[in-house]
């Protein structure tokens, strides 16, 4: 088995291992890790460049991220394609996979909160709607 990088979508804790921890040791949230590229991990940790993730690898990582969770990747393929394109444009232009539907503040700590996937479980668009979805609609509640 190959070790990979994982990022807690709540607090941005980085883990390197075969699998992510079930419980984030930093913020104590269950099942909060998503697989990320070595480059993204190094940027968050303040290191140098690594190997970029492709859009297909990112899609596969977010699909695995949703396994066993109450949410899934939006089945609207066209919408997801557009969102992934925006996520990768943000990575190209700003260095990280920022949510394509939210504005960066240019404050490093604040902007880490909107790296995709962000902590969308706390947003009103997810909590308050019957079909709950993340800010941009990349993730929706399973039915």
Image (cartoon, helix red, strand yellow):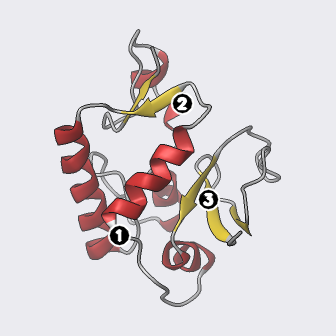
Discs 1/2, front: 1
Left of 138 or right of it: where is 11?
right
Residue at the image point whose x is 26% and y is 74% from the top: 93
Please say if 132 is above or below 67: above
Q: Residue at x 78, y 45 (%)?
A: 22
Is residue 115 visible in the rendered structure shown here?
A: no
Mark 1 vs mark 2, CA separation in Å: 26 Å
- Up/down of 66 relative to 129, above or below: below
Q: Nearer the viewer, mark 2 or mark 3?
A: 3
- Could you say where residue 80 lies in the image, as x and y percent from the top left? 26, 43
Instruction: Name the residue at 34% across, 61% down.
Output: 56
Residue tagged 3 = 7
Q: Give the crowd class for mark 3: few <14, some 14-19, many >=20 residues within 10 Å.
A: many
Q: Position of residue 40 (x, y in %)?
A: 50, 72
Q: Nearer the viewer, residue 96 or 51?
A: 51
Location of mark 2 (residue): 121
At mark 2, the secondary structure is helix
Q: Which quadrant is home to the C terminus?
A: top left
Check whether the beta carbons of the residues at disc 2 and disc 3 lie within 8 A of each other: no
- Marks 3, 1: nearer the viewer: 1
> Residue 17: x percent and y percent?
74, 67
Sequence-first disc among 3 and 1: 3
Marking on residue 54:
1
| SS state under label 1 | loop
Is residue 72 visible to the viewer in this orientation of the structure? yes
Q: Earlier in the sequence, mark 2 or mark 3?
A: 3
Q: How many marks?
A: 3
């Amino acid at each position: 088995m190959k070790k990979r990088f994982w990022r807690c979508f709540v607090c941005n804790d980085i883990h390197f291992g075969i699998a992510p921890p079930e419980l984030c040791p930093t913020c104590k949230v269950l099942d909060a890790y998503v697989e990320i590229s070595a480059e993204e991990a190094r940027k968050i940790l303040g290191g140098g460049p690594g190997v970029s993730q492709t859009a297909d690898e990112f899609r596969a990582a977010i699909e695995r991220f949703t396994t066993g969770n109450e949410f899934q990747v939006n089945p609207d393929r066209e919408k997801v394609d557009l969102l992934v394109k925006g996520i990768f444009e943000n990575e190209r232009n700003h260095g990280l996979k920022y949510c394509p539907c939210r504005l960066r503040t240019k404050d490093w700590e604040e902007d880490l909160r909107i790296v995709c996937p962000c902590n969308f479980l706390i947003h009103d668009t997810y909590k308050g709607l019957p079909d709950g979805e993340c800010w941009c609609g990349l993730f929706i509640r399973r039915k």
